[in-house]
């Protein structure tokens, strides 16, 4: 499982991943996370942040790519079951997709 702890809208946040109740890793974010999605099979997760960025992280908590700035405010974030793609829907109906497959 995983979770998000935020520092409010003026600061950053920390994404924390735990396994079996033990902290596995944490990653600093420049803005608090508002949505999370991921693919355990593909070994990555994504956090959509208040500032409109999407951060991709590996299963070890390392950044998989530079942050993506595709929408102003995220409304939905979905990872495909096999981890081939990430779908981001903005609050104003924008749609962005990122493929890893």
Image (spheres, rainbow, N blue to C red):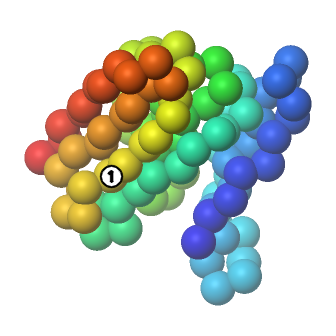
Which of the pair 43/86 is nearer the observer? 86
Viewport quadrant of the N terminus: bottom right
Q: Position of residue 66 (x, y in %)?
A: 43, 22
Question: Around disc 1, counting alpha carbons within 10 Å, would you say few (fewer than 14), some (14 to 19), or many (20 or more)?
Answer: many
Q: How many marks?
A: 1
Determine if residue 33 is in view: yes
Which of the pair 76/99 is nearer the observer? 76
Which of the pair 15/81 is nearer the observer? 81
Q: Is residue 28 left or right of residue 101?
A: right
Determine if residue 57 is in view: no
Q: Position of residue 77 (x, y in %)?
A: 43, 43
Q: What residue did someone put label 1 on? A: 79
Residue at 53 percent across and 49 percent down: it is 36
* Above or below: residue 26 compared with residue 98: below
Residue farthest to the left, as pictured: 101
Residue farthest to the front, as pictured: 92
Q: Is residue 38 left or right of residue 3?
A: left
Callout 1: helix, strand or loop? strand
* Above or below: residue 63 compared with residue 4: above
Q: Is residue 33 left or right of residue 70?
A: right
Residue farthest to the bottom, as pictured: 20
Hey, which quadrant is residue 29 in on the image? top right
Q: Position of residue 99 (x, y in %)?
A: 18, 37
* Above or below: residue 72 compared with residue 90: above
Residue at 67 percent across and 26 percent down: it is 50
Q: Position of residue 33 (x, y in %)?
A: 66, 38
Residue at 74 percent across and 43 percent down: it is 14
Residue at 35 percent across and 20 percent down: it is 94
């Amino acid at each position: 499982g995983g979770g998000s702890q935020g520092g409010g809208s003026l600061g950053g946040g920390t994404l924390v991943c735990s396994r079996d109740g033990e902290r596995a890793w944490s990653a600093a974010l420049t803005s608090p996370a508002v949505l999370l999605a991921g693919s355990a099979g593909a070994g990555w997760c994504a956090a959509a942040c208040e500032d409109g960025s999407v951060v991709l992280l590996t299963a070890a908590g390392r950044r998989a790519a530079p942050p993506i700035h595709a929408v102003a405010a995220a409304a939905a974030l979905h990872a495909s079951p096999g981890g081939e793609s990430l779908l981001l829907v903005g609050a104003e109906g924008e749609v962005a997709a990122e493929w890893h497959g």
